[in-house]
Image (tube, grey):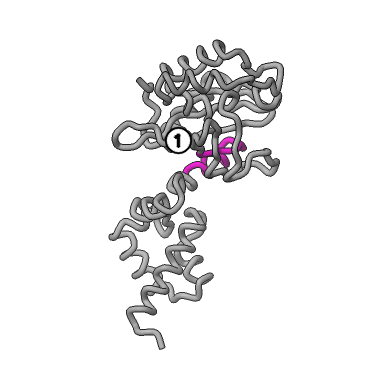
């Protein structure tokens, strides 16, 4: 038989998991009902979880994961803390949002969020060439110059569309531009109907840990919308969008 403290812990963990999965869409009363919890119990548990930093109040009666939950999730799965914000950004623009890292010269996508019914070929844990993707260009720009030189010597670089940069010196110039501006673009280089923007995610020491991106199918946003998306991506990245020196 479970002790009262174990029972309370079990209820709290169930409530936390349900709120995190819901991402603030449902009220606490609705989530409590779905979990078979009395509203008074759910309210008491939510207050405790909020005090400990595991929940953050979105608006009256609605909660999302707090910083303590985000740190715990990120320790288990890098980028997990950005899943909710990336999902909201993807829904806002009817697009796809990703978080990726560089592994052996390839981009590994750790998070993919849909904001549209259509699908995109990317999948979580999938790898993609770095030279032609917005995330990849951001990550290449963070490499020491000798490592970038070594990468560029490992061609050939295949043209996936007529817009793909394949000349090593052209790729180098593009990467240097990303280094200066702190934002990378895939201007229909992977697919003719795909436009993507990415910014770096940095740690407290300024080291680039990965990159977040927004990919739009079938349209290229105008300059004003691009600036707005880049600002929002930098917000998701936690301010990691400063130019990389």
Q: Is residue 82 left or right of residue 91?
A: left
Residue 239 visible in the current orientation: yes
- Pick the residue in front: 22 or 166: 166
- Please name the residue shown 50% across and 39% down the image: 99
Q: Is residue 228 left or right of residue 40?
A: right
Residue at disc 1, secondary structure:
strand
| Residue 133 image-quadrant placement | top right
Quadrant where the N terminus is found in the figure: bottom left
On screen, residue 225 above or below 107: above
Would residue 95 be counted in the magenta stretch? yes
- Please name the residue shown 47% across and 54% down the image: 24
Residue 59 visible in the current orientation: no
| Residue 42 image-quadrant placement | bottom left
On screen, residue 53 above or below 124: below
Q: Which residue is mark 1?
A: 210
Residue 215 on image: x %, y % = 59, 32
* Main secondary structure found in the magenta portion: helix
- Please name the residue shown 38% across and 21% down the image: 243
Q: Is residue 237 left or right of residue 50?
A: right
Which span of residues is magenta-colored? 85-99
Residue 39 on image: x %, y % = 42, 72
- Pick the residue in front: 161 or 228: 161
Would residue 166 be counted in the magenta stretch? no
Residue 240 on image: x %, y % = 38, 31
Quadrant where the C terminus is found in the figure: top left
Residue 94 on image: x %, y % = 61, 37
On screen, residue 197 above or below 90: above
């Amino acid at each position: 038989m479970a002790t009262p403290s174990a029972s309370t812990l079990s209820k709290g963990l169930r409530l936390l998991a349900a709120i995190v999965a819901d991402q603030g869409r449902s009220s606490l009363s609705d989530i409590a009902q779905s979990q078979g919890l009395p509203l008074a119990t759910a309210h008491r548990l939510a207050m405790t979880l909020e005090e400990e930093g595991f929940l953050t109040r979105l608006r009256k009666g609605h909660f999302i994961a707090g910083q303590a939950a985000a740190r715990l999730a990120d320790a288990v799965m890098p980028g997990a803390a950005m899943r909710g914000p990336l999902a909201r950004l993807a829904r806002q623009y009817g697009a796809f949002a990703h978080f990726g890292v560089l592994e052996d010269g390839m981009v590994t996508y750790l998070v993919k969020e849909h904001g549209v019914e259509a699908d995109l070929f990317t999948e979580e844990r999938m790898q993609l060439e770095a030279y032609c993707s917005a995330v990849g260009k951001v990550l290449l720009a963070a490499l020491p110059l000798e490592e970038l030189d070594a990468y560029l010597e490992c061609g050939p670089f295949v043209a996936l569309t007529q817009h793909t940069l394949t000349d090593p010196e052209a790729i180098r110039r593009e990467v240097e531009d990303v280094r200066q501006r702190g934002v990378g673009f895939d201007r229909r280089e992977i697919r003719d109907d795909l436009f993507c923007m990415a910014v770096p995610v940095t740690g407290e020491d300024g080291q680039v840990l990965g990159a977040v991106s927004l990919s739009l199918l079938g349209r290229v946003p105008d300059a004003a919308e691009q600036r707005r998306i880049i600002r929002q991506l930098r917000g998701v990245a936690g301010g990691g969008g400063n130019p990389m020196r």
